[in-house]
Amino acid sequence: MQKKLFAGLFWILLANLIVKPFWLLGIEVGVQNAVGNEMYGFYISIFNLSYILNILLDLGIVNFNTRNIAQHPHLISKHIPSILTLKLCLLVLYMVVAFSVGAIMGYGSREFYLLLWLCVAQFLNSLILYLRSNFEGLLLFKWDSLFSILDRVLMILICGMMLWGPFRSHFSILTFVYAQVASYAVTALLALAVIGKKTHLRALRLNWRFGLVVLKQSAPFALLVLLMASYNRIDPILLRQLASDADAGIYAGAFRLLDALTMIAYLVSVPLLPIYAKLCKKHDTTQVTATTKLVFPLMMAFTLGAAITGMATADVLMPLLYHSHAEAYTPVFRILINSLVPIGITYILGTLLTAEGKLRFLNIFAAISLVVNVVVNLVLIPRMGVFGSAWASLSAQWFIAIAQWVLAVRLYRMPIGTFRPWHTIVYIACVVLANALCANIPNLAIRLSLPVLLAILLAMALRLVDVKQIVNLLKKEE
């Protein structure tokens, strides 16, 4: 299982580290620079609304399906046609709810038109995620890796021509959204074709009894995803309502690099969920602890190193990304980047608890985190503006990470050595020192790359990244 985990990690990280950083830090930054903070804030607040509500397109089906197919792969041909039909029915529910919420928030024709296209994009993206969950459940990580980046590759090609090519004079936020819809549509059709060939896909049919069973079993997953999406993405929506489009745009700009780094943490959890699901089905607590001992220190090395280096180099990074008002992004980014550490903890231990089926606890934790986020936002935004929203997000992330840590340790009685605390403390001190020593280097390339290289070497030296064990696992025969 550990060998499959790292083989899956290799292909998924390889594919995504090539493409998605360029998408987030090249295309999305280019879009915000092209349209300005106010227009991008207008877009991101409506996008986040469509993103939070997109759980209605899924209702936990993706997480349920990954876990279910990993444990019962023979059911895939039976389930796909009915679930695809069910998702079409959920599209109607999603559109009704999204437009109703938009009406409550006072949207006009301009907002509704953008919301319509964003809803279409969210449906296609949800369809891709469902199709990918079948590859993940079957441990076909190479196919999953391909379809995890294909939509972004197509968007990079289209948006690149619009931003820097012959069509740049016609670029607007709407053309950006149209490019997303077209790219998602092509990717979904290709993924469906491959799934059909792999599983001998039958004709679509609506099986109400099966659909109700799936929704009943996936409902806890759906609630968890809704709550997590809400406390992760609600900040720009509240900023637009309580402050301005420009503040929402500044938050989005400062959040972008955190979002890019969070993607790496998320990608670790993708192959980890079916691996944990198989181990939990066998009640193999020894292997669960061994797997956690392997991946948790690795995640801490990445998130702590990135967070410390991000805070130290924020005054250099933000001007590199944004053409104007970089000074507005820098202090907000320094607060937000600290969220990477609790997010990394959540992607490891939350994945374990999801595989174990402890969704009631996870939903309680996520609900409290959402309340914490909203309350702190309501208190601090009128006083501190975008800074208050950043502190609200950080508070919510740390609450849920600590709660999941306590529950996982209690359930599996993991010894403290599993998390290598003393190695981690030494690592933090060394990374802080490395960044301090590099602070006055005049060459920007060396200034930014040297702390990262030193952090990697330190993680290996302290065995937070156990290279020898990983190499030995990959050399083992199946």
Image (spheres, helix red, strand yellow):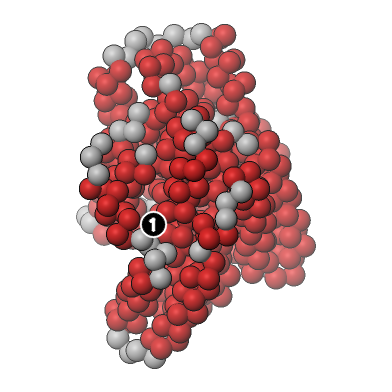
| Element under disc 1 | helix
Residue 340 versus residue 371 in the image, above or below: below
* 246, above or below 449, in the image: above
| Quadrant that contains the C terminus | top left
The residue at 48%/30% (across/down) is 282
Dot 1, crowdedness within 10 Å: few (<14), some or many (≥20)? some
Q: Is residue 266 visible?
A: no
**Residue occupying the point 32% across, 51% down:** 13
For the N terminus, the quadrant is: top left
Q: Position of residue 117 (x, y in %)?
A: 46, 37
Residue 293 in view: yes
Q: In the depicted view, which residue is nearer to us: 187 or 343?
A: 343
The image quarter in which residue 241 lies: bottom right
Q: At label 1, which amino acid type do we have?
A: Leu
As displayed, is residue 135 above or below residue 390?
above
The spot of residue 446 in percent (x, y) is 30, 81
Residue 163 quadrant = bottom left
Which of the pair 444/69 is nearer the observer? Answer: 69
Q: How many marks?
A: 1
Percent across and percent down for residue 8 are 32, 43
Residue 341 place in picture, x, y as percent: 53, 62
Relative to 463, is 58 above or below?
A: above
What residue is disc 1 on? 24
Question: Which residue corresponds to the image point at 36% horizontal and 72% vertical from the top-left?
Answer: 461
Residue sitting at x 70%, y 70%: 384
